[in-house]
Amino acid sequence: MEVRSPSMLSDLTHTYGNLESVKVLVTTFIDEKEIYIIGQSQAQNMGCVLDRLLKYNTDFMEYIDVDSEVDVKDFDRFHIFLSATGPPMETSLGEIRQNQDGNTSRTDEWVTLIKRLRPSAESVPTIMSGMEETYTSRRAWISKDSHTAAEIFREYSRFLDMPSLLDLEFGKLTGGKMDLFLRKWEAGIIRKLKSVAALETRMSSLLKDFEEKTEDEACYTALVVLTHLLPLVGASRCSLKSAIAYLVDFALPGTCIASLCSDPEASPTTHQPQLICIGDLKSATRQYIIVAKNDKVTIPLNDGLTCAVDKLFKLYWVCNLCYPAPLGSVFTFFEFVYDLPLSTQRKTKVLELIAHIKASK
C-alpha cells in the first residue's frame, strides 16, 4: 500500500480550501475517471491524494497545469486529478448523489450568468465556458421532457444570438461530426445527386442549366431533387411540388423578420422549424432565417444556403425535435451525410439512394 506523504495531504487541503473560498466550477477525477464528488472531506475519506491541478486558460482555450497557490477568481474552472491510494469511501451511491446538490447550484449560477450576458468580445469566452459547464445538465433536461424550441431558448437564449453554439453542441452530441455536412455536401453530394437524378427523365426540367446556377441555386435544386427521389409521407402530386417548403420557403424582399411568425395558416400543433429566405436565391441581399412559427422563434443567419441547412439540421438535434413528417426520409439522408445512424423506420428508399450515391463517380 502506497504511503501518503504529509505534503500530499497538505496540497489536497490547501487546494480545496483555496477553491471553496470563491464561486468556481470544479470537475474532479479519481484515477482518471470523472466522479461527482465535491469537497475536501469526501476526497480524504476515499483515501485520495492530489496528483494534478489544472485551470482553464481563456487565452489558450485549454486546461493547463497550475500549483495549489494559483490565484482564484469567481467563475474560474478547474480540473482536480486525484489518486485513490487508500480504502474506498464507505458510503452508498445514494449518499454520493445527494452531494450533487452542490453541482446543481453551481449549474444554476452558470445558467443565470449566461442569460444575463450579451455577446461581446469580453463576454464570449465566459459564455462559451458556461455553455460547456452546463452541457451535461442541459442535455439531461432537454432529453427528459419534450421541450419545445421556445422553452429551450428561453432557458438558453444565447443559442439565438450566437448560432455557432449550435455547431459546438452538435459536435459534442455526435462525437465531433459538426463539419461533415459542410465538407461533403457541396464538394461531392450535390454532384452525385445530379448524376442520379439525370437517369430519370422526370427530373430533366429540374436539372436544366444546372451548371449555370449559383451556389445557393445549386444547393436548392439538390434539395428539391431529394424531395423527388425520396418518398414523402402522405404526399400527393400537388403536395410533392410544395414539399420543399417544409425545409426552405421564401418571403418577399424587405419582409420584417418578426412577421415571419405570423402565419394564420400554420398548424397550431406544429413546432418543426424551417428555413425562410428573404429575397430570391440570386439576390445579393438575401438572408436566411430559421423560423419556428408557433414557438415565435427566429434565428437570423449570415451565411449561404448550405450553411443554413446545416444549422437547421443541428437545431433539430440540439433541441431533440422530431423531423417534419413529410420530409422524414430527406432528413434521414442528411444523417447519412453527417455519418450518423439512420433513425427512421422507413429507410428502404434512403438506403437505395445512398447506394447509388456511393456508386456514383
Image (spheres, helix red, strand yellow):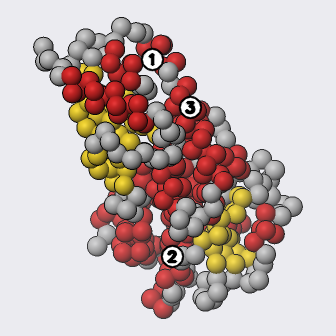
Closer-to-camera residue (39/154)? 39
Front: mark 2 or 3: 3
Q: Which mark is residue 96?
A: 1
Query: From this viewpoint, is residue 317 visible?
Result: no
The residue carrying mark 2 is 219
Circle 3/circle 1 CB separation < 8 Å: no
Residue beneath the point at 52% across and 49% down: 130
Residue beneath the point at 46% across and 40% down: 25
Q: What number of labels is visible?
A: 3
- Answer few, some or many: residues within 10 Å of disc 3's Cα (few below 14, many 20 plus, some between 14 and 19): few
The residue carrying mark 3 is 104
Question: Percent position (x, y) of residue 77?
Answer: 42, 45
Taking 68 as reference, is 61 above or below it?
below
Looking at the rendered image, the quarter that the C terminus falls into is: bottom left
Q: Earlier in the sequence, mark 3 or mark 1?
A: 1
Q: Quadrant of residue 67?
A: top left
The residue type indicated by label 1 comes to Ile
The residue type indicated by label 3 comes to Thr
Q: CA distance from mark 3 to mark 1?
A: 14 Å
Front: mark 1 or 2: 1
Q: Earlier in the sequence, mark 1 or mark 2?
A: 1
Q: Secondary structure at mark 1?
A: helix
Q: CA distance from mark 2 to mark 3?
A: 44 Å
Q: Secondary structure at mark 2?
A: helix
Circle 2/circle 3 CB separation < 8 Å: no
Query: From this viewpoint, is residue 154 visible?
Result: yes
Looking at the rendered image, the quarter that the N terminus falls into is: top left
Q: CA distance from mark 1 to mark 2?
A: 52 Å
Question: Percent position (x, y) of residue 254?
Answer: 77, 83
Taking 308 as reference, is 168 above or below it?
above
The residue type indicated by label 2 comes to Cys
